[in-house]
Image: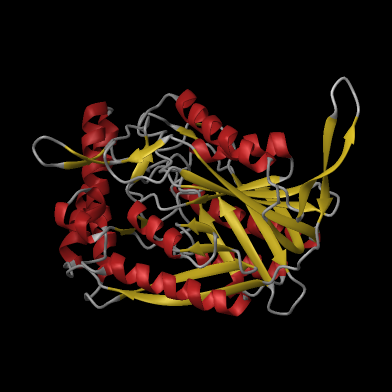
Amino acid sequence: MKAPALGTLRCGVGRADMTPPVGIPHANWGAAKHEVAAGIDHPLVLTALYLDDGSPEGTALWVDFDLMAVMPEQDPPWRSAAAEASGVPPERIFLSGTHTHSGPSVGLYSWVQAGRDLVAPYVAAVQQAVAQAAQHAKRTAREAHAGWGKGACAINVNRRQVLPDGRVVVGNNPDGMVDREFRVLRFDGAKGEPIAAVLQYACHPTIMAHENDKITPDYPGIARALLEKELGGHALFLQGATGNVGPIEGFTGDRAVYRRAGTQLGAAALSVAAGIRTRPGELAFKEVVPSGADLGVFRWTDGEEQPLKVRVLRKELRLPASKPLEIAPLKAEADRLGAEFQQTVKSGDGPAIRAAGMRAKRALIQLRRAERIGDGSPLAVPVGALALGSECVIFSAPLELFAETGFALKEGSPFPAFFLAGYTDGYRGYLPTDEALSVGGYEVETTPYGPGAAAAFDRGALDVLKELKAKVS
């Protein structure tokens, strides 16, 4: 047996708490009766991974947040803080969200006014936490060895459920496409001590939904914590192509459900991660030792170390947009329904609050969609790729990619160890396939992208991967 080790580099990791204060807006669900977080069920964290191959162009930093996404308005200040603290150029920094739907509402999608005074101080505190984690990751960087592995876990399902009347809802579609494979990237120190593990899986963290009024990282936080407890070091979570993929059991207020799912994924990932050998070599036959039976003894022999080249490539893809929408009437409607929601909250009527919240959220989503579409010109979408040698890559996009896109990229990637991270570097919306666009449903009704966009993305992404492969080969 030989180890699929990747090679050596310098690696450091930093962790900071980013748990918000109780009372911050918790408006991620239109069906919710509450406005603000009533408590903390599980802390939120951010984790910075620093990588360095010793060359001037060979540094990179990845920061993983327990947030729905890093929004475009948050990206520049947080990126600048990370760059200043770590010395890594801004273009080599990646900011990704786990996409938990039970974290704080700090972006532009909140129709809730209660607790808004807590948002700006919280965003500023996260910026300081980013700098703290990035600085610690750089300061603690040391010789490291990397390896990877993969496995499967069945807590997810295609979520585009078609009802008998033809309506598409966000539910369970057992016959739809879903990717249940996860991948683990592991970094160990020179003496084998664990530094970091990166887990990538695709499933919407929508287990905790409108009935839940507590802050949680949903299942990714539980999976990550289990890896850290049993392996040591810190773990990061990368959300894959989850645009049309959700949990088999979700939309609940029962917090035992997200802990159970996170434990399932964490245990599966732990089994794979524990078996990853980050040093090259092989298990070879050494001798026969006479005992009650003659024992064939095998021992591990380290192989020759290979330095890893760390490289980042950034590109901007241009994707077809949906038909333009008039912004003024949509804004007026969003303002009207937002005010209606505030009045309804005062009534204390639970069902009426839920109905008003649903209307306010849908109106705000359509306003943001129209703003993204603009005049209908092709939309600029920044993507990035971080290569660790010629075998491993993490590809990033600020999108909610469909499983079909995830498979296309994984199958077409020239890097065998392919990791995908959506919700990275300034959220830009759903990217449905043309087939989905023809059917409809939530993802279609909210996307700013039009026919041909997913195919154009696939082509552009694979071109980026091929170009980066040439640079590290």
Work out which quarter of the rendered image holds the C terminus and state it.
bottom right
Q: Look at the picture and state if 318 lies above or below 265.
A: below
Colouring style: secondary structure
Identify the image quadrant of residue 382.
bottom left
Identify the image quadrant of residue 63.
bottom right
Report the residue at 58% width, 67% height from top.
386
Query: Number of callouts in the render?
Result: 0
Q: Look at the picture and state if 250 lies above or below 182.
A: above
Query: In the image, residue 392 lies at what x, y percent?
Result: 59, 62
Answer yes or no: is residue 216 visible. no
Along the viewing direction, whichever of 465 and 17 lies nearer the viewer = 465
Does residue 102 appear to the left or right of 81 in the view shown? left
Query: In the image, residue 52 lies at what x, y percent?
Result: 73, 68
Does residue 322 appear to the left or right of 52 in the view shown? left
Query: In the image, residue 113 lies at what x, y percent?
Result: 37, 46
Does residue 415 appear to the left or right of 422 in the view shown? right
Along the viewing direction, whichever of 198 and 24 lies nearer the viewer = 198
Report the residue at 81% width, 62% height from top.
304
Answer yes or no: is residue 150 visible. yes
Query: In the image, residue 3 lies at what x, y percent?
Result: 70, 51
Residue situated furthest top in the rendering: 292
